[in-house]
Image: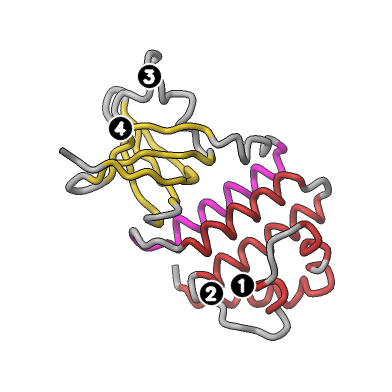
Amino acid sequence: MHHIYHTEGIILGSRNFGEAGRYYSIFTRDFGLVSASAQGVRKMSSKLRFVLQDFAYLKIDLVKGKDFWRVTNATKTNKLENLSNPEIFKVFINISKLLKRLLAGEDANTALFFDLLHGLSVLEKSKTKEEINNVEAIIVLRVLHNLGYIGNSESLEDLIKSPFEEDLVFRVSKNRTKILYQINKALKETHL
């Protein structure tokens, strides 16, 4: 009998396999980035068909297999459901790609998980192009910081350490050049 693990996760992407299966890249609160499969999820009769969608934030039940995880159940959290604005959705896709590129294996990083969750919640409420760009910059900065690619910087400490709230977005404009320099420098040094 396999143990069922209950956690929360954000689906960063998926791909089809077999006749009706799907592989998912899921950034989980408790296990980091996991690859999980769901058998029969593309069948019309599947109860998970409309729950396991790319970029969804879910409560998810997983069973650890020999080579990868298997999704046994998932339910919606009713968070991050309003990311349909094309500009916001594009940012979410870019952040997902960055996470899949930088996260190596299963390693829990709850600070990163909650920073990402709060950042995406603020992104969801963003109204202007400038706000969207500012939120993206903060999320990427925090992802890189949480993964150890950006150390403590006095000039950016406020943006890295402060709670991720909407007022933080307005502080980005005056530090935008420094933020983008740090992000580009860190990404170049990753060699990924």
Q: Neighbour class for label 1 at 10 Å: few (<14), some, many (≥20)?
A: few
Secondary structure, mark 1, is helix
Residue position for label 3: 46
Residue position for label 2: 188
Side (left or right) of 155 relative to 2: right
**Residue flagged by tag 4: what amino acid is it?**
Phe
- Placement of the N terminus among the 4 image quadrants: top left
Q: Which mark is residue 125?
A: none
Q: Earlier in the sequence, mark 1 or mark 3?
A: 3
Residue positioned 59% across, 60% down in the render: 115
Q: Are marks 2 and 3 in contact (CB under 8 Å)?
A: no
Residue position for label 4: 17
Q: Are marks 3 and 4 in contact (CB under 8 Å)?
A: no
Q: Are marks 1 and 2 in contact (CB under 8 Å)?
A: yes
Distance between the alpha carbons at the discs numbered 3 and 4: 15 Å
Q: Which mark is residue 184?
A: 1
Q: Earlier in the sequence, mark 3 or mark 4?
A: 4
Point out residue 87 in the picture as x, y percentages from the top left corner: 72, 44
Secondary structure, mark 2, is helix
- Region of the chain picked out in magenta, as a range: 85-105
Residue positioned 74% across, 59% down in the render: 165
